[in-house]
Amino acid sequence: MFEIGLFWRIHKKFKPNRTKFDWLSRDEEQVDVFAKDPYRIEDFSLGVFLDIIKNSKTINKSEAFKATPKDLPILMFSGDKDPVGEMGKGVKRVAKQFEKSGIHDFTFNLYEGGRHEMLKETNAEAVKQEVIAWLNARM
């Protein structure tokens, strides 16, 4: 087991750091809850990383987007300061792929200032309300 550089290095983008988990949310209380969680996982096996690498290559191919049912409603959202989503750049690429694939009902929200845990962010209630409104409009 080892700690991947992604998780222990990405917090540096949020200097000055209060914790090594500042990249998760602007909500310090939520960051503290995560930091104190005895069940959180920081160390992953090489097998987990191999699966992530293999599957991300597969799911990001244009064939995967083309195979998505065109009538499947999709809501995609992220924070523009999520380092896992390449500070918005990666999720924008994925959103463009979905748009190009001809999905009839595709909604994409990139929340300004949001980090990795959008449902535990400082604007979590607004995000939740937008998700609920999106779901209600389709039920």
Image (cartoon, rainbow, N blue to C red):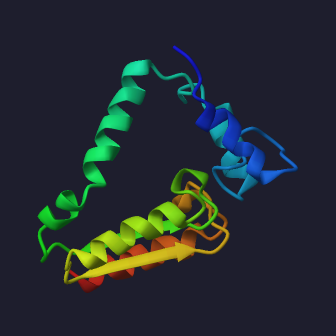
How many labels sit on residues? 0
Which residue is depicted at the point 17% across and 59% down?
63
Depth order, front residue of 123/76:
76
Q: Which percent across, then down, holds residue 67?
A: 12, 62
What is the quadrant of residue 113 in the picture?
bottom right
Looking at the image, is 139 positioned above or below residue 11? Answer: below
Which residue is depicted at the point 27% across and 86% down?
137
Q: Which percent across, then down, holds residue 129?
A: 46, 77
Depth order, front residue of 25/136:
25
Q: Quadrant of the C terminus?
A: bottom left
Report whether 17 appears left or right of 86. right
Furthest residue toward top: 1
What is the quadrant of residue 135 in the picture?
bottom left
Q: Which percent across, then down, holds residue 88?
A: 55, 66
Depth order, front residue of 122/90:
90
Report whether 41 appears left or right of 51. right
Depth order, front residue of 88/100:
100
Looking at the image, is 34 positioned above or below residue 43? Answer: below
